[in-house]
Amino acid sequence: MNSTGTAPKAAIFDMDGVVTRTARLHAAAWKETLDAFLRDHTREGTPQPPFDEHAEYLACIDGKPREEGIRSFLLARGMTAAPGEQESLAQRKDLVFTRLLRKHGIETYSSTLALIKAMREHAMKTAVVTSSRHGRAILHAAGIAGLFDACLDGMDLAQLGLPGKPDAAMFLAAADLLGIAPALGVIIEDAAAGVTAGRRGCFGLVIGIDRGGNAQALRRAGADLILPDLDGFGINALEEAFRQQAEARAWRIEQEGFDAGRERQMESLFSIGNGYLGVRAAFDCPAPGSQADMFIAGVYDRKQDALPYSEIEFLSPNRDALLHAELVPIPFPFRVSVALANTALDLSSSGRDLRRVLDLHAGVLHAEVVHETPEGRCTLIRTRRCASLVDIHLLLQDIVAAPQNHALAPSISPSLEEPDLAAHHPHLVLVERGTAPDAEWVRYRTRASEIEICIASQSRRSEHALQRLIAVYTSRDTEDPKAAALGHLQSLATCDFDMLLASHTKAWAEFWTRADIRVPGHPDVEQALRFHSYHLRLPAGDDGRTSVGARGLTGRAYEGHVFWDTEIFMLPFHLHVDPPRARSLLLYRHHTLDGARRHAVELGCRGACYAWESTDNGRNVTPKSILLRSSGKEIPIFTGEQQIHVTADVAYAVWRYWEATGDEEFLTGAGAEILYETARFWQSRISRGARHCHIRGVVGPDEYHYGVNDNAYTNWMARFNLERAAWLARERGDNLAEAEDWKGIAQSLYVPAPNEAGVIEQFEGFFALEDYALPGEDRFKAPLSRLFDWDRINRVKLIKQADVLMLPLLFPDAFTDAEVAANYRYYEPLTDHGSSLSPPVHAAIAARIGLAEDAQRYWRQSLWLDLSNAMNNSMLGMHLGAMGATWQALVFGLLGVRFRDAGPTSAQNTASHLMPGWDSVALRLCWRGRWHALRVPGANELES
């Protein structure tokens, strides 16, 4: 991933054709050398045409090391050289170049030198990079060596063992010599190979200089800006171009290069989706080991033992009686094969220069890779894909295979066939596969739940290109998914591909008018915030029968189960950015109320108890144990029966939704039924004592402690649930006898109060537990070692995540700042943040009490969690709860936003909480049907 700044710190120049007028001398030297070679080599008695010092020089040689240029030229001509002949040609070219240089002398570009001098006056560092072995000598002879802080030429290239352009190694080495991050550097090049190198190095701005009709090649190579010359292009223009490019990149997530060890992480990060389905970002020709999955919301099946739970190391046993226990990974719909001369191009063996770009603003994934055959033939494959936000059953894909140095025509063959269905997608049985000209379809059925899935594809072909429309339906949508999918494609037969894509991008643009958060001057922060908002939007659909699992539709972790994460951490984002989507998420809880009632009966209670882990019908699918893959050791899981606070979490979300929207229809309908049934659960779950009611034998948000009594968080939430159910029942005249009992229980429920030091005891007896020395290196990691030692950890003062500290986040007006500070200072050192949900909560609380350094540190950790793979498990899907919590930490913590009758307001001391250097933060929030623009100034702006 790359981050960007707003002002360049250094510039790296190519020499030949940019700084010095030596490019034409190089071209002339190559012509003289290669023409002599060509005269000695005929093909079947036919003389070879002479070397074209313009077209062939630019296409094959410009910007590359000598040997690479010769190899590229020979390949393009379909020729070979005898052993040692390439080196001989390279040496001969050097001699010719030296002679021409002495004859004609060295000329420079005055416009380039003027820009370099201006840069140095503005404290920008400069470097020159050239593949020419004469680089330093030319600079000294021209009297301009002193204009550069660093120089790398062809001699350095050989001595350091660096690959030449289009590899980024030389530019990255120059950036290192200058002491700058590539994102803060500018590359100025005239060769396509050099522009490609700048792009691969993730430099902040890559400028292509076109002094000879090379603009198209420079543009294809990825130049951000193409100029005929640098005349009139001064510092102001440079900084503006850099700023604009930084702004543009803040809407993109980019990956350069293929790393098999990180590929599954990249497939999660670059996923696409539309609420109905999500597709991981495997390349269109998937690499071996790729987890090329599609997920459809609501499609679950019986648990498969071999698939992981929350970590690769964790397996969970088969819950045979549960037919809807695990989200079903479905075969990749974008699979294609590309062949050259009947030989398939394989990403793992012939692919290089892989680049992915996720356009967050448009919701489109772009990818490209160069395939190089053993003979040296290079073919660029460029693709893009999206899951239509307008037509949720539609996927769009196009692919172009462009020969780079050969004339062979690549073939592109799309396929919906999964080569190894049993191994990769064990939940599915193949029912049918059919084909027609430029069309195919495939039908699957889940083994236990018997859900039918149909994927149909229709292709449109042109030279070196293919466009695909892919339709997806299940028997959850219609009785005949095949007829629906094929009929949908037929209805789109006359639709223009670009028109369908444009309607999709327009829908994303409309989303961003509500969801975007601006932090001027900090595009890296904006980029990460947009990445979070993008992923929060992907799995959130309009089907009230489905919700959002902990990892959404981006990976297999947690088996696609829905937790409290959705209501407590994700829903506030939707509530204030897209309220109808928040309503849909709550309708899922109403849809699964029967499952919650059943779970309450299983626990010996009345009413409805929402499952800690839920799928499509609300049944409790939480595993009772997990198995360690490496040792087979079994570890008990208590959350399924004891982590009952999720029930009150749902009720809390129902109430907050009504407060924010005023949606009376929802509150008096589905909302009322949820509040009443959950109140009945607490009514039957509490233990009545002489003075108080108690809730015993639970697990709070801190999952290291099980079987505890009177967990502060659980009791606070249960009291809120009972109070709001009682109020609504009295207002409506419903169940008045029950309402009085609910009110009475809420009043007598034991809720731990702050002690003399202001600290709330997390649960009965927590203060008396053993102390635990928590090594710093054990924080912010998946808690494997603590889970192995679960029984001992239950007896010590070690916390997995925010527990008591959740209360001032959810009830900000119920505590004084002094009480919040006392609890933060007590519990923060005891917390190992083994859950990704913990750091953003701590950020919000630290901001409230003025601990700016803590707030900023925790918030940064949360913001970059998945982009940096901080917990080393992003390959199994994005941490959506943490993303929602990061949004809350910014809005409710750092910005101090509170909602009053008139709308949102920000705390007066907010500026001191913001990150150093932030001038302001601007966003829009919805409150009771109205949109409010909020702009919060930072300390810098207030001081000025």
Image (cartoon, rainbow, N blue to C red):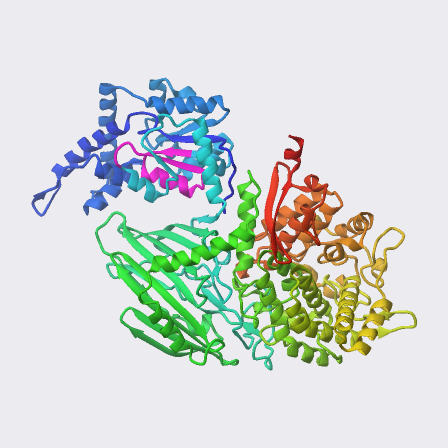
Residue closest to the far left: 45
- Where is residue 243 shown, x and y percent of the image? 48, 36
Residue 853 falls within the magenta-colored stretch? no
716 lies left or right of 419: right
Q: Is the residue 74 above or below the residue 802 in the image?
A: above
Instruction: Kindly identify the residue that appears in the image at 33 percent across and 76 percent down.
Output: 434
Instruction: Kindly identify the residue that appears in the image at 54 percent across and 50 percent down.
Output: 530
Q: Is the residue 313 above or below the residue 857 in the image?
A: below
Look at the image and tell me in which quarter the C terminus lies. top right
Observer-nearest of 402 and 659 = 659
Q: Is the residue 197 above or below the residue 118 in the image?
A: below
671 lies left or right of 181: right
- Where is residue 616 shown, x and y percent of the image? 58, 74
Quarter where residue 754 is shown: bottom right
Observer-nearest of 5 and 675 = 675
Observer-nearest of 875 and 499 = 499
Q: What residue span does the magenta drawing correspond to?
A: 187-213
Quarter where residue 647 is shown: bottom right
- Where is residue 693 shown, x and y percent of the image? 86, 71
